[in-house]
Amino acid sequence: EPKLVVEGARGCWWGEKHHCTFCGLNGSSMQFRSKPPEAFVAEVLGLARRHRILDFIVVDNILDVGYLDTALPSFARSGYDLRLHFEVKANLRRDQFDLLRDAGVVQVQPGIENLSTRVLRIMDKGISGCQNVRALRDAQSAGVTMTWNYLYGFPGERDEDYTAVID
């Protein structure tokens, strides 16, 4: 099935604050900038009308959190049966996953990366293992499919970091 690729933002607002130790995206500039929400919504809906396609892969490194109060409610009110994919930070709350679902977001890829809080600190992810598990639960409860990566092999990690997760 065809899908359209769109971009609402470049860079990473989290990376501007705390560059994850493993991230090689964005070259030498982490500066985050995004399209005005009205322009992004108009672009997506215009492409949907023009190409008669409702499936969109949004290729931003990370969802602009400002879109939670602007673009996403506009998509929800649009009357289009969109199916959107976004990359998000894993610290979203259940009500935010509900908002994503209502806007037509069917799949997200959060920056979970690991379930060990200690290893997440090594990565400078700014989130705990418990928060990552909560994000997995909340996305599923909201009906939003989640795909995620599990990274390991960081200098300083220990076998014990994974024993609790395996248990």
Image (cartoon, rainbow, N blue to C red):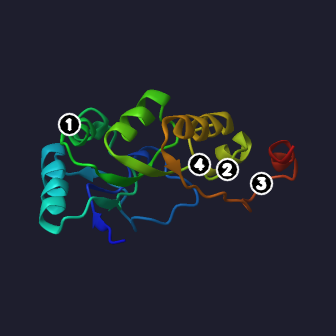
**Kind of residue sitting beneath label 2:** Asn
Element under disc 2: loop
Vertical placement of 124 versus 155: above or below? Answer: above
Disc on the earlier residue, 4 or 3: 4
Tag 2 near tag 4, CB within 8 Å = yes
Q: Residue beneath label 3, please? A: 156
Element under disc 1: helix
**Kind of residue sitting beneath label 4:** Ile
Disc on the earlier residue, 4 or 1: 1
Residue 84: % across, % down: 35, 53
Name the residue at 32% across, 72% down. Answer: 2
Name the residue at 23% across, 41% down. Answer: 71
Q: Using the numbered discs, state the Cα–Cα distance from disc 3 to disc 1 in whole angstroms.
A: 48 Å
Disc on the earlier residue, 3 or 2: 2
Element under disc 3: loop
**Kind of residue sitting beneath label 3:** Gly
Vertical placement of 8 versus 117: above or below? Answer: below
Residue 113: % across, % down: 62, 53
Q: What label does residue 112 carry, if any?
A: 4
Residue 25: % across, % down: 44, 65
Q: Residue beneath label 1, please? A: 77
Q: Using the numbered discs, state the Cα–Cα distance from disc 3 to disc 2 in whole angstroms.
A: 14 Å
Q: Nearer the viewer, mark 2 or mark 1?
A: 1
Q: Nearer the viewer, mark 3 or mark 2?
A: 2
The quadrant the N terminus occupies is: bottom left
The local crowd at label 4, few if under 14, some if 14 to 19, many if 20 or more residues have their Cα within 10 Å, is: many
Tag 4 near tag 1, CB within 8 Å = no
Q: Using the numbered discs, state the Cα–Cα distance from disc 4 to disc 3 in whole angstroms.
A: 19 Å
Which one is in front, 137 or 52?
A: 52
Residue 82: % across, % down: 29, 51
Q: Is residue 126 left or right of residue 9?
A: right
Q: Is residue 25 left or right of residue 59?
A: right
